[in-house]
Amino acid sequence: MKMPLAFLPEQASTLARDVDMLYLFLIGVSMFFTILIGGLIIYFVIRYRRRSDADRPAPLHGNKLLEVVWTTIPLVLVMIMFFWGAAVFYKQFRPPADAMEILVTGKQWMWKMQHPSGRSEINDLHVPLGRPVKLTMTSEDVIHSFYIPAFRAKMDVVPGRYTSLWFEPTKEGSFHLFCAEYCGAEHSLMKGWVHVLPEDEYEEWARGEDPDLAELTPVEAGERLFTELGCLACHNPASGTMGPDMTGLYMSNVELDDGRTVVADEEYIRQSILEPMAKVTKGYQPIMPTYRGQLDETQLMQIIAYIRSLGTE
Ligand code: HEC
Ligand SMILES: [Cu+2]
């Protein structure tokens, strides 16, 4: 069944319907009680108005039935809102394991995207129809927010950390993309289009116009950076090394020299590169230099993609 929701944007992702149904329920409940309470106030004002100076109504000290009713009904309603909202929230924040990952960096005032094939684009995002897509996002400068109204998908993009967003498009076409966090003078121009293509057309697009000029995939670009920046000098298991082996590092438990244990997720790897002294791996000397200022956010995400490709524990 298709609902004519002219006051909401088009529904173009698997989540859009869930979000809208919840939203309409909340609006419906709010409207019902606004009208009920507003109406009762007007009715009581008239019905119980002071009729003469000598009016002395009998004092009321309570009504158990009334108390029970006006406690139970709101309780049931807010519990429905809570569990329904939590269900939608979980769905929205858990990307399916097979989702295709696209890297996104926001900066004043544009969006840069890199696809698994290596192809990059600015302010346009091509995605395949009917396939889950996960965006891994960060910012070069201030907080931005990645917002696709037709997908009911929005997530803040924060400097210094990774956030993600996922969606599965259900309609071909082009949909608005906005920055939804005020980020400076040209914030209102920080927008673009999401183009949903049939799967085969997307694959063709992702290969690029000229296959001979094909760009490096994020993993390949990361591997190249790893060599060019001299990481291999220390992180090279083949030649007796000064730094830990990166194979199987991703998502493993790392013991630190201060006794703590941390999980080697994206944030940890990022911090290891920018602030190597912050968390020193147990059994190693703190000799790794910082790479702050030598890498932009896209390159950092590429190195992380490369380290991830070396396996999970
Ligand atoms: C001078 C040697 C040296 C260089 C060059 C170097 N590292 Fe390191 N790296 C280390 C040492 C030693 C450690 C372990 C001590 C620590 O955590 O600081 C380490 C730790 C790490 C860790 C955390 C690993 C773990 O098991 O917890 C990561 C990730 C990392 N380095 C990435 C890089 C990357 C990426 C580069 C290149 C951009 C690089 N390193 C360059 C020596 C180096
Ligand atoms: Cu912005």
Image: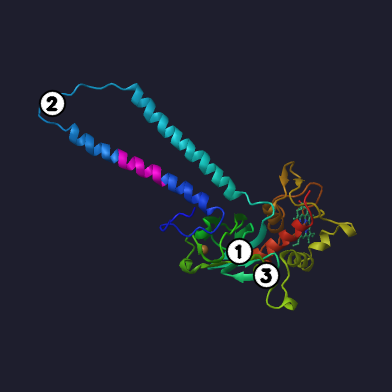
Instruction: Check if mark 1's residue and mark 2's residue have beta carbons within 8 Å.
Output: no
Compared with residue 39, is residue 64 higher up or lower down, i.e. above or below? Answer: above
Tag 2: amino acid: Asp
Distance from the alpha carbon under mark 3 to that under mark 1: 18 Å
Q: Which residue is mark 1?
A: 105
SS assignment at label 3: helix
In this rendering, does residue 275 appear at all? no
Q: Residue furthest right?
A: 239
Left or right: 207 in relation to 187? right
Q: Is residue 221 visible?
A: yes
- First in sequence: mark 3 or mark 2? 2
Label 3 Cα neighbours within 10 Å, binned few <14 / some 14-19 / many ≥20 = many
Label 1, secondary structure: give it. Answer: strand
Q: Is residue 29 magenta?
A: yes
How far apart are the alpha carbons under marks 1 and 2? 71 Å
Task: Name the residue nearer the viewer: 307 or 12.
Answer: 12
Vertical position of residue 236 compared to residue 207: above or below: above
Query: Which label's residue is closer to the chain start, 1 or 2?
Result: 2
Q: Residue 206's mark? A: 3
- Label 3 vs 1, first from the N-terminus: 1
Closer to the camera, 200 or 138? 200
Residue 203, image x and y in percent? Answer: 68, 68
* Residue 39: image location, x then y, percent: 27, 40
The vertical placement of 100 against 112, above or below, is above
Labelled disc at residue 55? 2
State the residue in front, 80 or 122.
Answer: 80
Type of amino acid at the residue the image marks with label 3: Ala
Going by the numbered disc 1, the residue's amino acid type is Thr
Task: Examine the structure image and report whether residue 170 is included in the region drawn in magenta.
Answer: no
The label nearer to you, 1 versus 2, is 2
